[in-house]
Image (tube, helix red, strand yellow):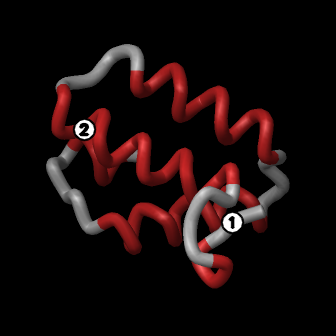
Amino acid sequence: MQQLESGNSDLLALRECLVDFKNRGMDKECMYSTLAEMRAECDEKTEDIILELMDFVTGFCRAELRIY
């Protein structure tokens, strides 16, 4: 998630990073809990981005953007 740290807020690029983690074996629960931990330690703008990413993980988005 280095892209968050560098200020890159391109949501779809960040989503692709999560897809890569999934493809490398990260399960849904681990991904969601990692995002939740990051959310607890960030500013409001970054939190909004993380919440969008969490929606991709949980499937609360368009079907073609779901990660799991």
Residue 25 picture location, percent across and down: 84, 55
Seen at 17% across and 38% down, the residue is: 45
Relative side of 3 to 21, left or right: left
Residue at image coords 63%, 83%: 64
What is the crowding at mark 2: few (fewer than 14 residues within 10 Å), some, or many (at least 20)? some
Classify mark 1: residues with Cα within 10 Å, few (<14), some (14-19) or many (20+): many
Q: Residue 32, percent across and down?
A: 65, 37
Q: Quadrant of the C terminus?
A: bottom right
For the residues bearing labels 1 and 2, Cβ distance under 8 angstroms: no
Above or below, 45 against 61 in this view is above
Percent across and percent down for residue 34 are 59, 30
Extreme residue toward the bottom, this view: 64
Asked which secondary structure carries label 1, the reply is loop
Identify the mark at residue 67; answer none if there is no mark: 1
What residue did someone put label 2 on? 46
Residue occupying image coordinates x 27% and y 23%: 42
- Which percent across, then down, holds residue 57? 65, 53
Q: Residue at x 40, y 42 (%)?
A: 50
Sequence-wise, which precedes: disc 1 or disc 2?
A: 2
Q: Secondary structure at mark 2?
A: helix
Q: CA distance from mark 1 to mark 2?
A: 20 Å
Tell me: 45 left or right of 3.
left
